[in-house]
Image (cartoon, rainbow, N blue to C red):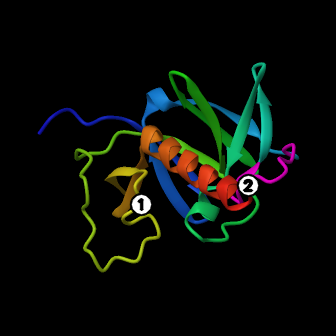
């Protein structure tokens, strides 16, 4: 077994999810994001951060769940792409005792995160499986769904 990685644990509604530390940039308060006409339902609006304009993405909408109005945004990014993910709370920086696993949940598990293409693995926290988000896969999915939404309106 290799050395465990660290993860930021974030909460959206009752759901906790994890991000690798290199992807997590900062936290912003969400007051009133600027609306984006004709945007997909998962785009809550635009936020300004350090001179950049960022889309605010609602993962609850992507999962088909109403998780409540977010009060914070986790600014996440990789080279060439930065976006804000709506959240309710930053829980902690966490070092799991075991390595991340690809799919530790049984197939009958009812988590809305199960099988999502942007979940790259799972870690255990407080005896619960926690999905780890992959930014590359998430942005690919957001791009695809945005194109589908805009194409349907043409």
Q: Secondary structure at mark 1?
A: loop
Q: In the figure, residue 99 lies in which quadrant? A: top left
Asked whether, in this view, residue 62 is left or right of residue 21, the answer is: right
Q: In the figure, residue 30 lies in which quadrant? A: top right
Name the outermost residue toward the left.
1
Look at the magenta stretch and give its main secondary structure: loop
Asked whether, in this view, residue 143 is left or right of residue 96, the answer is: right
Asked whether, in this view, residue 31 is left or right of residue 101, the answer is: right
Q: Residue at x 47, y 70 (%)?
A: 112
- Is residue 127 something one can see in this rendering? yes
Q: Is residue 39 magenta?
A: yes
Q: Please report the bounds of the magenta region as a residue range.
A: 33-44
- Label whose residue precedes the other's in the sequence (2 or 1): 2
The one of 121 and 152 positioned closer to us in this rendering:
152
Q: Residue at label 2?
A: 70
Q: Residue at label 1?
A: 116
- Is residue 126 something one can see in this rendering? no
Q: Residues within 10 Å of mark 1 (few under 14, many from 20)?
A: some
Q: Position of residue 68 (x, y in %)?
A: 72, 65
Q: Is residue 18 magenta?
A: no
From the image, which quarter does the C terminus lie in? bottom right
Q: Position of residue 11 (x, y in %)?
A: 58, 54
Asked whether, in this view, residue 130 is left or right of residue 8, the answer is: left
The one of 128 and 40 positioned closer to us in this rendering:
40
């Amino acid at each position: 077994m290799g050395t465990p990685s660290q993860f930021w644990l974030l909460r959206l509604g009752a759901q906790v999810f994890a991000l690798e530390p290199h992807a997590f940039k900062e936290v912003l308060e969400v007051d009133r994001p600027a609306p984006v006409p004709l945007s997909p339902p998962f785009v809550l609006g635009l936020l300004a951060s350090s001179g950049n304009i960022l889309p605010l993405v609602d993962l609850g909408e992507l999962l088909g769940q109403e998780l409540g109005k977010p009060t914070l945004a986790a600014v996440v990014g990789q080279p060439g792409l930065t976006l804000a993910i709506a959240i309710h709370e930053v829980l902690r920086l966490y070092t799991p005792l075991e390595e991340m696993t690809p799919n530790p949940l049984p197939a009958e598990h009812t988590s809305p995160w199960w099988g999502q293409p942007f979940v790259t693995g799972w870690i255990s926290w407080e005896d619960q499986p926690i999905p780890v988000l992959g930014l590359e896969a998430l942005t690919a999915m957001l791009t695809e769904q945005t194109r589908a939404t805009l194409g349907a309106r043409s």
